[in-house]
Amino acid sequence: TNKYEAHHNPIGDLVEDSIRFVWRHGVAAAATREARGPLAVSASGVHVTDADGRVYLDGLSGGSAAATLGHGRVDVADAVHAQMTTLHWVSLRTFINEPSIELGRRIAGLTDAGLQTSFFVSSGSEAVESATQLAKSYHRAKGNPERTKFLYRKTGYHGTTLVGASASDNQEFRTWFAPLAPGFVELDACYPYRRPDGMTEEEYGDACADAIEATILAEGPETIAGILAESIPAALVLVPPANYLRRLREICDRYDILWIDDEVFIGVGRTGRWFGFEHFGVTPDIVTSSKGITGGYVPLGAAIATGRVMETIYGDGAATQAKVSGHTYAAHPTACAAGLAVLDAIEKEHLLESTARIGEGMIEAFRSRYAGHPNVGDVRGKGFLIGIELVEDAGTKAPFAKQLAVGRRVMDRAMEQNFMLRATGDVITLFPALVTTQQDADDMVAATCRAIDEVLGEL
Ligand code: PLP
């Protein structure tokens, strides 16, 4: 590269270089040349600034829900700096370290669900994979090594590694990365808005649970290790009927199948509780977490098992029973120090309460704004996880034709108007940071409605 030109036109060159030197996650190879996202240069609170000086209001916690404390937190940076200059990292193979012990203890105490032991990794996909290994260890320790299958649900997303992709309903991954890991069995989603006509939500919750049990019986319970299911599937914001997870819990108990509740997206505050399962009065066997656990400041993930699961795995022979992989960055002290600073901030600033209150207000605002609207079928959510389903006909729930790409257009329009929202199909989703204020929330509601109304008006 001509250095003078690079100096002369730094942004243009960086865009070219980003295509050449950085594989952009989540963007299909063929589209990479087109995918010239803005160049982010700085961020503070719920605003991100690009190289042209445009300031984006961030309705997505950085884009993938991780920046739950917003951007530019000095308290987290200070904690990270202090840890890095004291003990940045040593291997868990050789040493134990204090930040990870403290973070594990704090996580165990967040709820009364009996969560006990954290297996700390560096991402959500690794947390999911580790959870499946813990589940297999549990069954091996009980003398059932043939229990190796996992059930997952349609529309679910659990990551990009082989296990994550094998448990995800992402057809691009499923074809492109075939063959996937064996032993992953698909279940239907629990999608209350799309339940059969004439069924109450509760009847639908029961029907979904009955279908899970039927699949278990057809596969053979003695072959199944676990079910991977988010308490509230985040991509489409599928808040389940109250009875659904209770029934899932009963079914898991009946057949000694472990419920792995993937809380990578919503865990650590997003729904106004520490974890999504708390809304339903149920307790999973293993919970996965990432994103919010460090607010995205440093990568960290965790598979968190209950004491019951761990007692079985340790058994009488203690560690001889358990074979779980160990990553170089397992229980990374600096990442765990960031996690502790994030938990402190959430507690001190009462962010669970404000998330529940302001998030509920946003949901209400969308509901009243769009009551009776012919193209807004459903508004749903919990805390700062909000979904608005756009349809061709709210009366019949008929979806828009795919080629209209309504959701995509709303997302692009919002971005043109300096606002970050997401569309999964035609479900418009928002997942702002827990530090979002009432004023920010009002701005986000206005920006969302503007993009939706403009695009619907053009159809
Ligand atoms: N599980 C869920 C529910 C997720 O939302 C994600 C990421 O979006 C993952 C797993 C994978 O996490 P990561 O992207 O950190 O590997």
Image: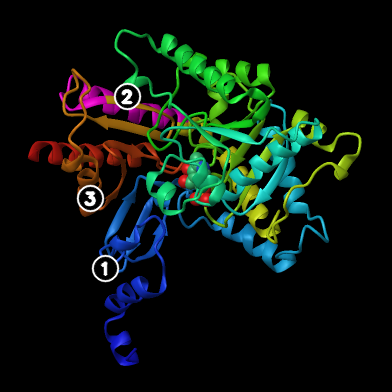
Closer to us: 159 or 355: 159
Q: Nearer the viewer, mark 1 or mark 3?
A: 3
Task: Report the number of discs.
Answer: 3
Where residue 257 appears, x then y in whole percent? 66, 26
Where residue 72 appears, x then y in whole percent? 48, 58
In the image, is 407 to the left or to the right of 263? left
Q: Are marks 2 and 1 in contact (CB under 8 Å)?
A: no
Residue 364 marker: 2
Closer to us: 440 or 281: 281
In the picture as drawn, the residue positioned furthest to the left comes out as: 458
Q: Nearer the viewer, mark 2 or mark 3?
A: 3
Label 2 element class: helix
Label located before the other in sequence (2 or 3): 2
Q: Please tell me whether residue 85 is drawn above or below residue 333 in the rendered image.
A: below
Label 3 element class: helix
Residue type for callout 2: Glu
Q: Please tell me whether residue 242 is drawn above or below residue 101 in the rendered image.
A: above
Q: Please tell me whether residue 228 is drawn above or below residue 83 in the rendered image.
A: above
Distance from the alpha carbon under mark 1 to that under mark 3:
18 Å
Residue 412 marker: 3
Closer to us: 194 or 139: 139
Instruction: Identify which residue is drawn at 62% across, 16% down.
Output: 250
From the image, tell me which residue sits under label 1: 52
- CB at mark 2 closer than 8 A to ligand 1? no
Please tell me in which quadrant of the rendered image residue 48 appears.
bottom left
Where residue 237 appears, x then y in whole percent? 39, 32
Q: Are marks 2 and 3 in contact (CB under 8 Å)?
A: no
Question: Which residue range is magenta in the image?
Answer: 356-377
In the image, is 337 to the left or to the right of 317? left
In the image, is 57 to the left or to the right of 432? left
Residue count near mark 2 (Cα–Cα under 10 Å), binned few <14, some 14–19, many ≥20: some
